[in-house]
Amino acid sequence: MNRHRLHRLFWVGMLAVLILMAEQSVAAAPVQGSELRGDSGAASRYLMPGGGMAFEPGFDLQSAPQQITSTATVAPAPTEAIAPTATSQPADPGRPLIVVESYEIGQESVEAGQEFTLQVRLKNVGNRLAFNIVATFTPGDFVPRVSGGVLAKTELDPGERIKLNQPLTASMDLLGKRFGTVVMTLSYDDADAVSYTGTFNLSIPITPSRYVAQPTATPTPTPTALPSFRPQILITSYETDVPLLQPGYRFKLTLEIENLGNADAKRVTMIIGGGSGSSGGLPGTPDVGGVSGGSGDFGNFAPVAASNVQFLGDLSQTQRLQASAELIVNASTNPGAYPMKISFTYTDARGAVFNDDQVVTLLVYSPPQVDVNFYRPPDPFFAGQTGTLPLQVVNLGRKSVILGTMRVSTTAGQMMNDSILVGALDVGGYYTLDAILTPDLPGPLELLITIDYTDDFNQPQVITRTLTIEVQEMVMPEPGVDGGGEGIPPDGGFPLPSEPETFWQKVLRFLKGLFGLDSGTLQPAPVEMPPSDVPIEEPVPRAPIKG
């Protein structure tokens, strides 16, 4: 047991001597660290500069004489050992780096709408020179002044500081806020013309708003505007003498005019189509005033028989006046509603000129141009006898039309087959209807023909035409006298029955015909009627016998 202890102590002592020798050699050599390896090649501990030693976890010091051999190479010890010194590395080597070191506003806080100066301190913490330094302040919570929001410096050496002073105005949007933000964008280049950009958000405290009661404004009376005294001409109503205006129609437009102003109107002039009037010169100078009426719109309606300018004279307050104008509808005008401008120019008692423009609306229609008549002369009609009415409708217009139902009616007879649907008719097209009529009485008889259609304003309309025919009285034939003449034959108009002809009678008639004799069939002898003038004996009444 003692032998084992002595053996272990011997190896521990040898290990300590080896470690001491290794530490001295490492301190003298330019080796930052060495390692001791065991038989397996795994690192067990490290020799650190300054004589320190680091052990890995799990290293067994008691088993070191059996497992560890030194692999450190010891260099010859110099005369003096130089201890290594720590060197500091730059924050961002190889480029300029400008940062905001500090900023201030010269006061604790600012109020909304207040002007102040922002001072920013910049520092180049890089190791290279910065060129073309430009600071841009973006408008937002604070609006830059004086410089336009751009400040520039030529260069900034590494470690050098500069100050930038930018005048600002706090926006009114900061009311009710505690902080505002100044956005500063910084751009610069290095010596190799490489650009760098950085954005900084600088927070500035805002003074809380203080609301101060304002004195109440004393209400002041506003002057009442005096009424304006001037005439006012208005068109109260208008009409045309033609119910349906069509392209090419001439018509008369009548206007009801009234002065609804509070002053009299002098020298009233009406201008169809629109126009204006100008005042004349001052007294003693040539009169250059006049009425302009030639610039109106006359594409759809044009004046005829007179110009579009009419002098109406004076019109006092509440006075009414009727004016009229002869116009014509342009032949190329399409169906529709057309506004017509009418201007009135007049003066008041002081000579002030007034121009009033008003508009009236005229409707232009284009109904179907059709003709309804007989396509041939009708047969004579007799009272109580049925006849045919050969009717037809023809499109005489310049465009095709669509017609509805065509009907025929009368108050003095009975009609059959009296209606038919017409449909589309091309230019020059026609449609026929053969109605059947039975007149009741002789004499002139009126036929009413109606055709339905829809006008250009989608309203149902009816085309109405009237035709007249003559109805004759029925003639009753009279019986003839002595079996001859016109009228009913003596036998009552019915042929007498005859016996059938035999074969030999036919041969006999044939032979008579060869010799030029009468070969007609034998007619039965007519039955003689008693003369109508023979008096008919009436029984004579006898007197009663008295017994």
Image (tube, rainbow, N blue to C red):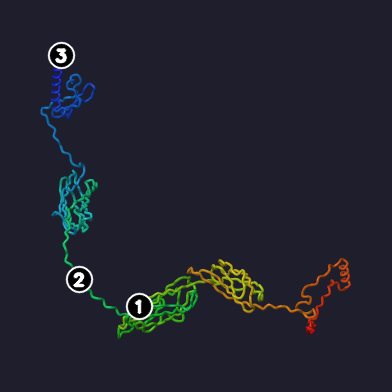
Q: Earlier in the sequence, mark 1 or mark 2?
A: 2
Closer mark to the observer between disc 1 and disc 3:
3
Q: For this view, does 86 lie left or right of residue 501?
A: left
Of helix, strand and loop, which one carries label 3? loop
Res 1 label: 3
The quadrant in which the N terminus is found is top left
State the image coordinates of residue 177 (x, y, percent, origin top left). Answer: 20, 55
Q: Amino acid at mark 3?
A: Met
Q: For this view, does 340 lie left or right of residue 486?
A: left
Is residue 368 among the parts visible in the rendering? yes
Query: In which image quadrant can residue 312 be found?
Result: bottom left
- Residue lying at the far front in this picture: please name it: 547
Q: Do tag 1 and tag 3 residues touch (Cβ < 8 Å)?
A: no
- Total numbered badges shown on the rendered structure: 3
Res 355 label: 1
Which residue shows up at 22% across the image and 46% down it?
190
When the figure is inspected, residue 426 is found, relative to residue 225, above or below; the finding is above
Pointer 2 residue:
219
Query: In which image quadrant can residue 535 be found?
Result: bottom right
When the figure is inspected, residue 469 is found, relative to residue 113, above or below; the finding is below
State the image coordinates of residue 151 (x, y, percent, origin top left). Answer: 19, 54
The quadrant in which the C terminus is found is bottom right
